[in-house]
Image (cartoon, rainbow, N blue to C red):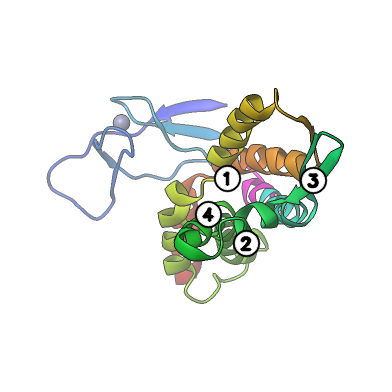
């Protein structure tokens, strides 16, 4: 793996400038070879790191995430046992527990943050990246779709939910016997896959590929 540093921008040309996502330094964009890692010269954030088959890997991870999401929604999530009574609940039950009355908006927000937004992100990514992995022209409106996917990133909070569940389990642990269902583990796997996928994906590479394919 070779490391490279992108040069700081001079004042004259604006066409090929990119900003470091961490420290906002203005840098000159230039072609980065596969296997190379381009970093910000000021804060050393990785700006671009094209890897062979990266697109295919991201697509595989997004697909796995979608399948795990389906498992996480429909399989039993938790099983509570207290005084001989057993209660199983799925993620769907958990979200629906707040439906009706004043907590109705909570149901909508919860369903959106835990299920709808992450699913939308995975589908959007597949839509944008699949044609590129096969070397085809970008899908229609691929650029706005990718911008939207990036916009959703901070709002897809599956991992926050897992931490919340873990905290709740510790609290309830003394009161009832709890066993974790397959959906819980599917959800944990989903979070790990999402983190891997986000690490693999170089935004600059995706934008550059979109741009190049649109022109070809
Ligand atoms: Zn920087």
In the image, 93 versus 212, the foreground residue is 93
Residue 50 image point, x, y percent: 54, 42
Query: Of the residues under marks 4 and 3, which one precedes in the sequence?
Result: 3
**Magenta span of residues:** 52-59
Frontmost of labels 3 and 2 is 3
Q: Residue 30, can we see it?
A: yes
Give the residue pinned by disc 2.
126
Tell me if 44 is positioned left or right of 187 in this view. left
* Residue at x-position 64% and y-position 63%: 130
Residue that carries the numbered disc 4 in the rendered image: 110
Helix, strand, or loop for circle 1? helix
Distance from disc 1 to disc 2, alpha carbons, whole Å, reads: 19 Å
Measured as percent of width and height from the top left, residue 48 is found at: 45, 40
- Closest to the observer, 161 or 96: 96
Upstream in sequence: badge 1 or badge 2: 2
* Above-or-below relation of 173 to 150: above
- Pick out the residue farthest to the front: 83
Choose the circle earlier in sequence order: 1 or 4: 4
């Amino acid at each position: 793996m070779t490391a490279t540093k992108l040069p700081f921008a001079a004042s004259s040309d604006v066409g090929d400038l990119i900003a470091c996502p961490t420290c906002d330094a203005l840098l000159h964009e230039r072609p980065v070879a596969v296997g190379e890692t381009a970093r910000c010269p000021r804060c050393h954030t990785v700006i671009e790191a094209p890897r062979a088959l990266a697109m295919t890997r991201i697509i595989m991870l997004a697909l796995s995430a979608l399948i795990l999401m389906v498992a996480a929604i429909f399989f039993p999530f938790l099983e509570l046992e207290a005084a001989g009574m057993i209660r199983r609940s799925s993620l769907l039950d958990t979200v629906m527990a707040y439906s009706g009355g004043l907590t109705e908006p909570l149901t909508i927000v919860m369903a959106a943050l835990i299920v709808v937004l992450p699913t939308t992100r995975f589908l959007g990514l597949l839509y944008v990246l699949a044609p590129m992995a096969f070397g085809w022209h970008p899908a229609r409106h691929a650029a706005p779709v990718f911008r939207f996917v990036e916009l959703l990133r901070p709002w897809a909070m599956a991992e926050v939910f897992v931490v919340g569940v873990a905290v709740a389990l510790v609290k309830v642990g003394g009161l009832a016997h709890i066993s974790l269902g397959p959906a819980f583990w599917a959800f944990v796997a989903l979070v790990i896959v999402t983190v891997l996928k986000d690490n693999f994906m170089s935004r600059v590479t995706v934008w550059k590929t979109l741009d190049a394919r649109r022109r070809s």
